[in-house]
Amino acid sequence: MTETPEDLDPLHQVQQRFRDAATRVAGLKQGLIDFFAQPKRSIAVCFPIEMDDGSVQSFWGFRVVHNRVLGPGKGGIRYHPGLTLDEVRSMAALMTWKCALIGVPFGGAKGGVVCDPKTLSPAELRRITRRFIAELGDNIGPHTDIPAPDMYTNAQTMAWIYDTYDVMHPGRNNRPVVTGKPLDLGGSEGRRDATGNGVVYATERFLERGSLGTLNSLTNARVTIQGFGNVGVAAARLFQAKGARIVALGDSRGAIAAADHQGLDLDAVLAHKREHGTVVGLPGSRSLTGDDLLALDCDILVPAALGNQLNGDSAGRVRARLVVEAANGPTTPAGDRILQQRGIPVLPDILANAGGVLVSYFEWVQNSQNDTWDADLVEQKLARKLHLATDAVLARHFTMSEQAAVEDIGARLLRTAALSLAVERVACATLERGIWP
Ligand code: NAD
């Protein structure tokens, strides 16, 4: 008998998980479930760009707003050759639930351009960005839909977005139209490390609440991190500052493990990565494959790279006591079931990596007030919100698993608790506003 391959389509996964969570929200009408399962608006634009060599190429750009009940759409802009409209739709929906869970007054959105930034010059990227934003016109705005960086876009891209929008709308404060800007243009202190730091604050709270038996603090916890980019680096640093040991790390070229029980020297890893473009080959470390990294004996495994890493094939080999999802969608539904059956809890992405959108919200507030907050204030507010959201998810999880039938694995997932809480909040706000007209 041949087994059906696992469905790894991100939109299917997000919709399946949403529908499962929605059944656990008391009294949610079927019509609202159908409405939340779909994006509110999807825009696809095709536009020409003159390339540096004088040729002309056409590009597709997308912007999807999934929901705006709690506030303007909010979500990143990704530049990637494999980007599809369905993928953007799945990420826009995740943003709705993430914003609702962490308690910021935004809805969910996402966007991007199908292009390969590795083959484009800065001038070409600038023209693509400006033309894309001009094509979107008034479909983005400080009170309607607010972009941010995502994979292969950065503070420079956000500066071009701000400038393009500002040129098109002179005479008013347009800084809140986009977040993740350079500090000089109204970016927030703490934004760069916000996602990685948020991962640590959520983990710390989870442990302090006694959710993992004897491991009730980060002191001496053994942490493995897959992905050593923006999120992985910040998380590694704060984990270590709080007393944890980073026992292994991986990137797209392979992985390394510490040779002794002290853990890796992060400054040495960063210096090696800067020089060689990878963590692999760090003197004194042991080399591993990417698969071995996920199967390493440790306390906390943090996938901080790609989606679908812990799946029906790989989840059975995980030997960590806790998985913390720094990446978006690193665990598949089959991976969730396997980890649950093996007693390994998963702190879900919409909680664990919500620090990024939270500090984006802080940037928007500062821009709207023409104010700047210092780094300590941002960090304090970030930690507090992550702690509160973790508490809320744990409380929901406790109630749900108390009431669940033995065979109902879904009810025992922290992900279902987090999602159902978020869905309930958006549903409640929808009904309080009233279904228009
Ligand atoms: P990044 O591009 O800075 O870093 C990605 C890292 O993953 C790099 O070290 C890369 O080498 C590694 N990687 C790529 N392919 C890999 C593979 N096959 N195996 C192992 N490692 C691999 O990206 P980032 O901003 O750190 O984002 C990482 C994840 O976190 C993504 O899933 C992103 O969607 C998610 N996320 C990021 C933010 C944010 O604020 N940056 C917010 C929320 C979620």
Image (tube, rainbow, N blue to C red):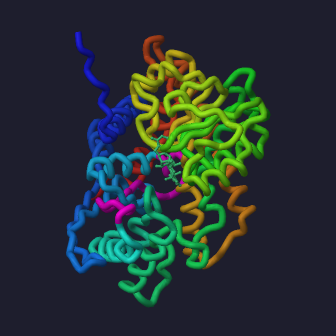
Above-or-below relation of 132 to 167: above
Q: Quadrant of the C terminus?
A: bottom left
Residue 110 in the image, given as x and y percentages of width and height: 37, 57
Residue drawn at point x = 77 percent, y = 46 percent? 241
Residue 258 visible in the current orientation: yes
Residue 197 visible in the current orientation: no
Front residue of 136/277: it is 277
Residue drawn at point x = 24 percent, y = 80 percent? 54
The quarter of the displayed image where residue 189 is located: bottom right
Residue 174 falls left or right of residue 140: right
Q: Is residue 115 magenta?
A: yes
Front residue of 401/261: it is 261
Residue 32 falls left or right of residue 57: right
Residue 26 in the image, given as x and y percentages of width and height: 42, 31
Q: Is residue 117 magenta?
A: yes
Residue drawn at point x = 31 percent, y = 48 percent? 87
Q: Quadrant of the N terminus?
A: top left
Residue 24 falls left or right of residue 371: left
The quarter of the displayed image where residue 30 is located: top left
Q: Residue furthest bottom?
A: 171
Above-or-below relation of 119 to 289: below
Residue drawn at point x = 53 percent, y = 16 percent? 342
Residue 146 falls left or right of residue 34: right
Above-or-below relation of 214 to 324: above
Residue 68 in the image, given as x and y percentages of width and height: 38, 57
The segment highlighted magenta reads 98-119
Count of numbered circles in the view: 0
